[in-house]
Amino acid sequence: RILDKSFDYVDGKYGVHGGVGSPGAVEIIATAPTIASPKGTFDKLGKSFHIFQASPPGTASVVVTNWLMGLFEPDQHYSFMVNQKGRPIRHRGEEVPADTTIVTQTHYLDLMKIYKRFHNDFDEVFFVVSSRGDSEELRINPKLCEYNNVLCLEYEDLIYANRSQLETMVQKLTAIFQDRFGYFFGENSSLLGSESQMNAIQRLEEMDKAVASLSSQPASVIDKKFGVHGGHRSNSNLLEVKPLAANEGDPDFKHMAEDVKKSFHVFAATPPHTASTVLTNWIMGIFEPEEYYSFMVNTKGRPVLQNGVEIPISKTIVT
């Protein structure tokens, strides 16, 4: 069904790509996600900008991200800067340029390096950061909050348990955003008005529904619009929900077949054009028939990707 697709098209479940016309399966090979072409810049108020939502995991960063996206691009899928060498930005399973979206989420916290990398691409680069508690692992460097293009929020600012509290939270956060970045957007920007705030409220409500719908799914299943993943039970404020990121660990083999008492992993490691996808899908059919394939990319660090997101090796049984 994907023979008429371009070679860049990769089936996320089986690891086969488009454009292979051979009648035999032996010519079908697994490929890593490819680079997407630029999709244009964003020009608001006659000038361009980009917002990085940069926070430690576990600080309600997904709430901040979807609030911001609700204000500026309510129907867009989220982008995530992976915390690995090169800091690639991924969007809908592909590596993309920063201007593909207005908001990019990341757990990489060297804001100065991010700014130096992107400040020539936009008229302004903003950072919106969330921190939690007293642990250094859950907090941003407080000195970064002194910069005018950085807005620092606390975990307590992001709590809501019902529609009324959600509306109040969005209004409060947007007012803080307007006050902090008024030097760029102006004092009464239509981008931050009641219509934009309503879009943010609706997006966060849709995010809540996405979390609930994925609660019984494995963590490897990721909603590419909101950046939430399976395995979470629905909470009233969703503050513990966060994207599956490159530097996050999980309990070893927590989803292994129930009748296997020892943990194991199978690598289908073969040269291209040796029927490797047949081998991979046969093994996955035995141990994890509904799972999407994972692929170890032959680049420095050997990252393992699934559905375009870097994952721990324990997320699947077969790589």
Image (cartoon, rainbow, N blue to C red):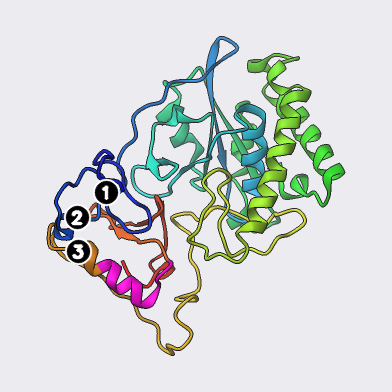
Q: Which residues are magenta?
A: 280-290
Mark 2: few, some, or many residues within 10 Å (few <14, many ≥20)?
Answer: many
Disc marking residue 28: 2
Q: Position of residue 172 (x, y in %)?
A: 80, 34
Mark 3: few, some, or many residues within 10 Å (few <14, many ≥20)?
Answer: many
Which residue does the numbered mark 3 point to in the structure image?
276
Compare residues 78 and 131 and report the one nearer the observer. Answer: 78
Q: Position of residue 267 (x, y in %)?
A: 26, 71
Label 3 sits on a secondary structure element that is helix
User: Which quadrant of the view contains residue 297?
Assistant: bottom left
**Amino acid at circle 1:** His
Question: Are dots 2 and 3 in contact, CB under 8 Å?
Answer: no
Using the numbered discs, state the Cα–Cα distance from disc 2 to disc 3 in whole angstroms.
Answer: 8 Å
Q: Position of residue 27 (x, y in %)?
A: 14, 55
User: Which quadrant of the view contains residue 290?
Assistant: bottom left
**Amino acid at circle 3:** Ser
- Whether 80 is drawn above or below 31: the answer is above
Compare residues 9 and 85 and report the one nearer the observer. Answer: 9
* 262 inside magenta stretch: no
Q: Position of residue 35 (x, y in %)?
A: 31, 37
Classify residue 244 as left or right of residue 87.
Answer: right
Which residue does the numbered mark 1 point to in the structure image?
17
Residue that appears at 19% across and 47% down:
20
Residue that appears at 37% across and 77% down:
287
